[in-house]
Amino acid sequence: DLASQRAALLSLRSSVAGRTLFWNTTNQTPCNWAGVKCDQDRVVELHLPGVSLSGQIPTGIFSNLTHLRTVSLRFNALTGKIPSDLASCINLRNLYLQRNLFSGPIPHFLFDLPDLVRVNFGFNNFSGQFSTGFNNLTRLRTLFLENNQLQGSIPDLNNVVNLEQFNVSNNLLNGSVPLKLQTFTKDSFLGNSLCGKPLSLCPGDEGDNVPPSEIGNNGGKKKKKLSGGAIAGIVIGSMVGLLLVAFVLILLCAKKRSSKKTSSADVAAVKDRELEVNGGENKVNNVENGGLANGNGYSVAAAAVAALRGNGNKGSGVVSGGGAKKLVFFGNSARGFGLEDLLRASAEVLGKGTFGTAYKAVLDVGPVVAVKRLKDVTISEMEFKEKIELVGAMDNENLVPLRAYYFSRDEKLLVYDYMSMGSLSALLHGNKGAGRTPLSWELRSAIALRAARGIEYLHSQGPNVSHGNIKSSNILLTESYEARVSDFGLAQLVGPSSTPNRVAGYRAPEVTDPRKVSQKADVYSFGVLLLELLTGKAPTHSLLNEEGVDLPRWVQSVVREEWTSEVFDLELLKYQNVEEEMVQLLQIAVDCAEPYPDKRPSMSEVAQSIQELRRSSLKEDQDQIQHHDLINDI
Ligand SMILES: Nc1ncnc2c1ncn2[C@@H]1O[C@H](COP(=O)(O)OP(=O)(O)OP(=O)(O)O)[C@@H](O)[C@H]1O
């Protein structure tokens, strides 16, 4: 009956997929749960991270799951001890219990699990001595015990020959760091009373390179007397420095004198440039009639505007005079506004990129546009025109259209449609707080498909046409969250100092010159972008950096350890019915991020595969809807 069944229910619960699940070991198999992977009905992975598990894990759970290879219960609120029946999981390789409230000593039976490779107990309340038993775990590669209350000294872990990751920071440990562990950085040991390399010397110890005579009584280094040569060097160096400062001051004074003759607009330009240089200011004062406005409005490229007007005043201008330059529009783009309107528009800085600063400009009459003010354009006007016209001719629903451009000696502006939902990067990594709206699987896979189609279109324009800077901040979203690829064709316009250097993490291993990026290198970057969509991790994620790996390698290592479900973004875990599609997209991503360019698929193949996997899940949805309709009809 229900009551006795309830009594039999074990208290391990999770709110996976919005439901409260009860784990009844007697008559219910957990194989169909999200986060649980079964191999021929034997559970091999138990993966319940961040699902509000609380209380003690009841004993008896693990004795039925002796085939477990991975247990991940991280980011919950589990208390008490690790149940002793975990000892029966003799195949256990990965044990991730970080960020819970486990307490008591680390149980000894763990040291009889010979296959353990990754152990993460960080951020719990484990106490007691740091056991020498860890030395039994000869296959261990990761040992994270940081932020607990472990005491005593760190034992020599001489048998753990493959240890790659180690952290015991913020415990109550004392004594010296064992020789074998001295290769890890300081961060692995901070927050204890430890000494010795990589921390400061232990009392009475001698540094490797420091002769005893240089160690003071208090263990610190004695100050070394400076040699005559060093003193002479310092004196000469200081004199040269002083001369340089004086020279710069004279130059500045001369410049100031000559600038007295400039117009008020130039002053505005300088002020606005200062505003911009001061950075962090998202909004810039408006510039009206060559002067600074009342300060209520925000102007676009206030500096650009002022500079343009300033030049106009001098007669060589771009705005005034019969030979005035105009915005050049492409194709059928609406010509509802001109340069003057743009200059009058109120605007805010969207961000600074490799090629310059982007502004959102709200025109008095006409559309909202994004204006990119290019820096470091060194090519001639003719060459610029030729190249930008190729960019303007790109016409595909999955690209952010370039509407117009402006070219003068001092200013180069590009006008794009404004994408009101911002970038994929902001959507994935911005606002992690309470007000965050999770990105659904449907949206993520739709973004993947549109981005793939956009790049496929670019590649179809010729074998040498590539994007060169695929990353999540260059995938922008319309009001209805449709993805568009932006920033294509810009690398060819700017000088070498503006080549995209921020593509770290996305750049294919074979790319040495970031301005010469092949289509296959685009495919690699797109693979990384897919991994970012699936894992929710930025390729520049600090954790990855800590581990010294890039996103593709991290994903591959996790997948290799049969821990596939762990790679997915927590926000995706509730979509149980699409796990297969998620794994398929992961496979596509991994294929794209192949180290060898020849092994990567073409962008058309990638787009096709994504379309197919989406079609199958859409079809399933459709089937389900029809099924529900049928039931309703009955
Ligand atoms: N058309 C647009 N609509 C809305 N936001 C845009 C638009 N173009 C750029 N942005 C936003 O402006 C900011 C700066 O963009 P920009 O393209 O200049 O640099 P980036 O993408 O960060 O780097 P990079 O220049 O290396 O591509 C980014 O946050 C981007 O999302």
Image (cartoon, grey):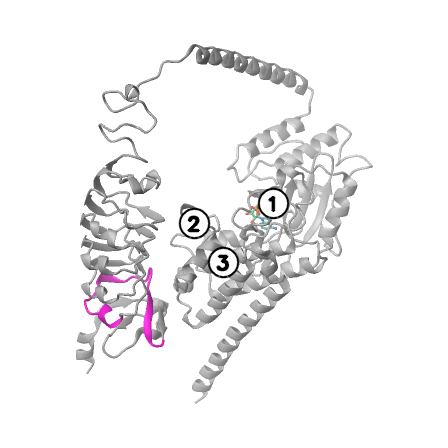
Question: Disc 3 designates what residue?
Answer: 531
**Going 45% across and 54% down the picture, which residue do you hit?**
537
The image quarter containing residue 260 is top right
| Screen quadrant of the N terminus | bottom left
Question: Disc 1 designates what residue?
Answer: 512
Image position of 236 with respect to 467: above or below: above
Indicate the secondary structure of the residue bearing disc 1.
loop
Between the C-alphas of marks 2 and 3, the distance is 13 Å
The image quarter containing residue 49 is bottom left
**Going 22% across and 55% down the picture, which residue do you hit?**
102
Indicate the secondary structure of the residue bearing disc 3.
helix
Question: What is the total number of numbered labels drawn onto the structure image?
Answer: 3
Which amino acid does the dot numbered 3 rest on?
Answer: Leu
Between the C-alphas of marks 3 and 1, the distance is 23 Å
- Whether tag 2 and tag 3 are in contact, CB under 8 A, the answer is no
Task: Return the x and y of residue 540 as percentages of the image width and height.
Answer: 47, 48
Given this view, does label 2 or label 1 mark the residue nearer the observer?
1
Question: Disc 2 designates what residue?
Answer: 544
Describe residue 44's horizontal placement relative to residue 624 as left or right.
Answer: left
User: Closer to the N terminus: mark 2 or mark 1?
Assistant: 1
Task: Return the x and y of residue 502 as percentages of the image width and height.
Answer: 55, 44
User: Closer to the N terminus: mark 2 or mark 3?
Assistant: 3
Q: Is residue 60 part of the magenta span, yes or no? A: yes
The image quarter containing residue 375 is top right
**Magenta-colored span:** 40-65
